[in-house]
Amino acid sequence: MTVAGTSFNTLVQLDPIYATFNPSETDLARISQAAAGGAVGAEILLSGDSRRRLHGKLSFLDNSVDRATGTITARVVVDNPQRNVLSGQYVRVRLHVGDMDDALLVPQAAVGSSQIGKFVYVVGSDNKAEQRYVSLGASDGDLVVVTKGVKEGDEVIVGNLQRLGPGTLVQARPVEQAGS
């Protein structure tokens, strides 16, 4: 409401709160397919935080693509009873558009990058490092899904990647998995 052109008051709803975001048009088919199957769940993560904070549902998906950016406008509604998220705050939004049964996850710290693409090192025959180019999928915290390039049972090398090269002699030391 304005009085003589001056802002008088601004109303902000904090619970529930809406998070507007812009997924790529390449994600539109997966999001639409998930929405056709029912409510699409969402997770809101505060900027700089890797833990899931708040849960909500997709409430709006625009019917046009922004030609300048190749994105669509979407919005989720999230219960925010403790007011953890404030209006205007930056958040990350993750939509639950499907499940990946038997997904192979590796630590993001194990993934290297070159002009050819993303790679990991695995312990090969004779305890020598072997470089494998990989295709990556979604990430979950410090882990990332590998869709191609390694298989179950491969020993992925984590740490000191800058000192490794194909054929480098390595000594495998298993690490404890979180929650083990």
Image (cartoon, grey):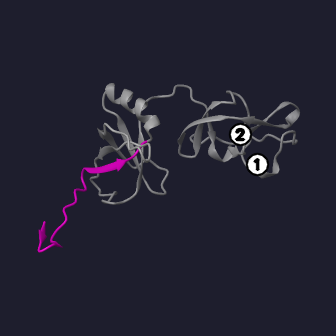
Q: In the image, what residue occupies the spot 78% across and 52% down?
A: 162
Residue of label 2: 119
Residue with the most extreme front position? 67
Secondary element at tag 2: strand
Query: Which amino acid type is marked by label 1?
Result: Leu
Quadrant where the image shows the C terminus: top right
Residue 18 painted magenta? yes
Residue with the most extreme left position? 3
Query: Which amino acid type is marked by label 2?
Result: Phe
Residue 145 painted magenta? no
Image location of residue 84, percent across then percent down: 34, 57
Image location of residue 73, percent across then percent down: 35, 44
Up/down of 28 relative to 88, above or below: above
Decide: few, some or many residues near mark 1? Use Cα within 10 Å; few <14, some 14-19, many ≥20: some
Query: Would you say 103 lies left or right of 85 here?
Result: right
Q: Which residues are magenta?
A: 1-23
Q: Which mark is residue 161?
A: 1
Magenta span dominant secondary structure: loop
Q: In the image, what residue occupies the spot 85% across and 36% down?
A: 127
Towards the viewer: 78 or 66: 66
Residue 180 showing in the rendered view: no
Image location of residue 37, percent across then percent down: 33, 25
Q: CA distance from mark 2 to mark 1?
A: 11 Å
